[in-house]
Amino acid sequence: MSKRHLAFVCQNCGAAASRWQGRCEACGEWNSLTEEGGDKPVGPRKPAKGRLFKLEPLTGEAKDAPRLPSGLSELDRVTGGGFVRGSVILMAGDPGIGKSTLLIQASAALARAGHRAVYISGEEAAAQVRLRAERLGLSDAPVELASETSVEDIIATLSEGKVPRLIIIDSIQTMWTDAVESAPGTVTQVRGAAQTLIRFAKRSGAAVILVGHVTKDGQIAGPRVVEHMVDAVLSFEGEGSHQFRILRAVKNRFGPTDEIGVFEMTGAGLREVSNPSELFLSERDLGSPGTAVFAGMEGTRPLLVEIQALVAPTSLGTPRRAVVGWDSSRLAMVLAVLEAHCGVKLGGYDVYLNVAGGMRINEPAADLAAAAALISSLANSPLPADAVYFGEVSLSGAIRPVSHSPARLKEAAKLGFARAVMPEAARGEAGDPAIRFMTVGQLSGLVADIAALGKPRPVAEPRRKDG
Ligand code: TYD
Ligand code: MG
């Protein structure tokens, strides 16, 4: 056998090494190096003469509509308006989250609209995919179906006849190509197969969606390099016990990355949720302390979610801080501001924070709602059920303005909320008379207000400065 170089490949990051090591030098992962056939033997080769190609101007005429809406508007919202010709999307998610279901629904919708859609499954037999389609009521859609794993065979078959408008490869981890010698499932194979499929997409103009599995720690299994090779990476998320599924763009060369698509997994497949606020607030615990409604934004769409907090005396030496659906360092920051500027002592308390419905919030605007929920739980006094909160807390304890206040207020009014607690500075741009607004300049002001709520009061709600 000829001498091979770089025959050990890290299964986490795809870095190559010439000998086995316990730890990958590139990514630091332990025990991730596996011997692979390696690329072709390195040796002196006759340099091939390059093929001449045509250079084109930027202003060429586009052959066809460059984007094709999928027929699922929540999916289109995330991709930025539909599938772009010749583009490749990686759809990543935990096993069982609903990737195959979403993609068979999307391909059926496209096929019904008269486009050629091909679904290649490397995991399930064609009969299994057909069975699922039947269950979803999609049997009549003219989707072309196959169970195949050889990339060369797939490309040869799809090169015949009319170019497919959409090709689903479910999943990229099951594909293998002759071009590399490694075993199927290895990083080198996944990368090689992805490369070949991407080249086919660019050449033929078909949009290709690669399904990718995610490992336990949330990484897209196999090479991270596939993420860099494709045009867009969509992540399909959801808490196992909730029926909500959220589609996010992690990377998108042709659209925004802050939009989310919301779906609900039902017995008849994924249902689009066009008014997610209603869904996230559908099971509210009215009148219990420690919950606050946050008027958030996801991309261009306002989204109301409930933030729940529990502050309880600790029985341990070091109090616990646990957070689901929000950034734990932001929680630490809000707690520090409460201690330092508002006289709220939390050193002897465990603190738990949860975003209801399996939603994950990234916005700093959630600071004020989180703080309100925390104080409400500590004071054991429920917040008004008809109030929403938004605003960023700065380290000095000031409440800072956030973007899109009018959209947040409008959504809150639409869902029947009567008042909004928000930054002082947002008063100017908030022109909506449908909702009363109370502004707070300092976090300590909010603490005092909530403490006042807890006092027994004979009359109705204390009236506060209105907008
Ligand atoms: P699937 O699309 O196979 O997930 P993935 O391809 O991401 O691994 O979805 C599997 C789960 O979805 C399974 O637990 C059953 C559930 N499901 C429904 O609840 N309703 C349905 O109509 C379908 C098709 C699946
Ligand atoms: Mg699947």
Image (tube, rainbow, N blue to C red):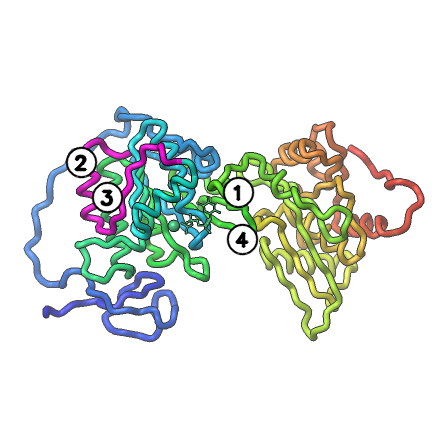
Q: Which mark is residue 160?
A: 2
Q: How far separated are the C-alphas under marks 1 and 4?
A: 12 Å
Amino acid bearing label 4: Glu
- Span of residues in magenta: 138-165
| Mark whose residue sits in front, 2 or 3 | 2
Amino acid bearing label 2: Glu
**What residue is at 32 percent from the left and 51 percent from the top?**
124
Instruction: Confirm whether residue 402 shows in the render.
Output: no
Say what secondary structure mark 4 lies in: loop
The residue closer to the viewer here, 299 or 149, is: 149
What is the tally of numbered marks visible in this picture?
4
Point out the residue furthest to the top here: 61
**What residue is at 15 percent from the left and 60 percent from the top?**
40
| Mark whose residue sits in front, 4 or 3 | 4
The percent coordinates of residue 458 (x first, y second) are 93, 45
The residue closer to the viewer here, 281 or 76, is: 281
Q: How far separated are the C-alphas under marks 2 and 1?
A: 37 Å
Lateral position of residue 299 relative to residue 142, left or right: right
